[in-house]
Image: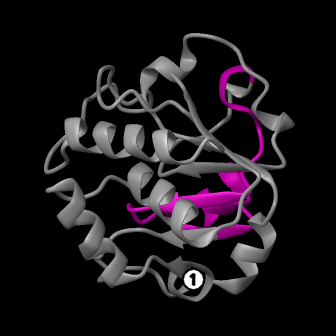
Amino acid sequence: MIKLQQFLKDKPIALLGNAKSILDSKKDIDKFEVVCRCNKGFPKGKEGYIGSRTDVLFLSIPLHEKIIKEEYNPKHIMWCTSKREGLTDWLKDNALFFNLDDWTNLANIIGARPSTGIIGIAYLVKYVKFKSLTLFGFDFWDTPNFYTGCKNIRNHSPSSEKAYVEYLIKEDKRISIIK
């Protein structure tokens, strides 16, 4: 965990959510020193909108080692959910794990199961001394996910997650959101 914190320290970070709205306009994501992605937000074919690089991959769905290496090639991987059964040995050996107490605290704040994106935000805010954190593709389920076309809300709370992010932005001027 310390290696990841050192890697992120004092850098401008882009964290990309997977809302379809992220594909509405082109942006220069790769200009950020660090690019973080969530789950299946593969950049291939969408580089003009979401960049080409993945430095940190936040995961809550088990992806095969080949997919992680070929589609992302991240420097760091963080497993974000409290569910840890069924993970491959490779993923267990190569991922950092979001702290379960932090997961529970975040779930209590949100009042629902936290999404991968909100976990990534919470981790960065709590544990990383970043220069800036710019959020892209977080519209809190106003548009569907760009890789499934669905609004996979399930047990999440879009309004609570939005309120949490708005609070963080108000409290920390280094954080911004671009939809």
- Left or right: residue 124 versus residue 74 is left
| Residue farthest along the top direction in this orientation | 25
Q: Is 175 placed above or below 95 here?
A: above
Colour scheme of the rendered structure:
one colour
Residue type at numbered disc 1:
Trp
Q: Is residue 166 magenta?
A: no
Q: Residues within 10 Å of mark 1 (few under 14, many from 20)?
A: few
Q: Position of residue 2 (x, y in %)?
A: 70, 85
What residue is disc 1 on?
Answer: 90
Q: Nearer the viewer, residue 100 or 84?
A: 100
The quadrant holding residue 84 is bottom left
Q: Secondary structure at mark 1?
A: helix
Q: Nearer the viewer, residue 143 or 89?
A: 143
Q: Which residues are magenta?
A: 48-76
Residue at point 44% right, 33% down? 138
Horizontally, residue 60 falls left or right of residue 70, namely left
* Residue 56, x across and y down, in percent: 66, 60
Q: Is residue 121 above or below residue 15?
A: below
User: Measured along the vertical axis of the image, is residue 46 above or below residue 116?
Assistant: above
The quadrant in which the N terminus is found is bottom right
Count of numbered marks: 1
Is residue 70 within the magenta segment?
Answer: yes
Q: Position of residue 54 (x, y in %)?
A: 72, 51
> In this view of the protein, can residue 86 be seen by the observer?
no
Please identify the residue farthest to the front as the structure is shown. 171
The residue at 18%/66% (across/down) is 108
Where is residue 152 shown, x and y percent of the image? Answer: 24, 38
Confirm whether residue 21 shows in the render: yes
Name which quarter of the figure residue 127 lies in: bottom right
Q: Residue at x 55, y 11 (%)?
A: 24
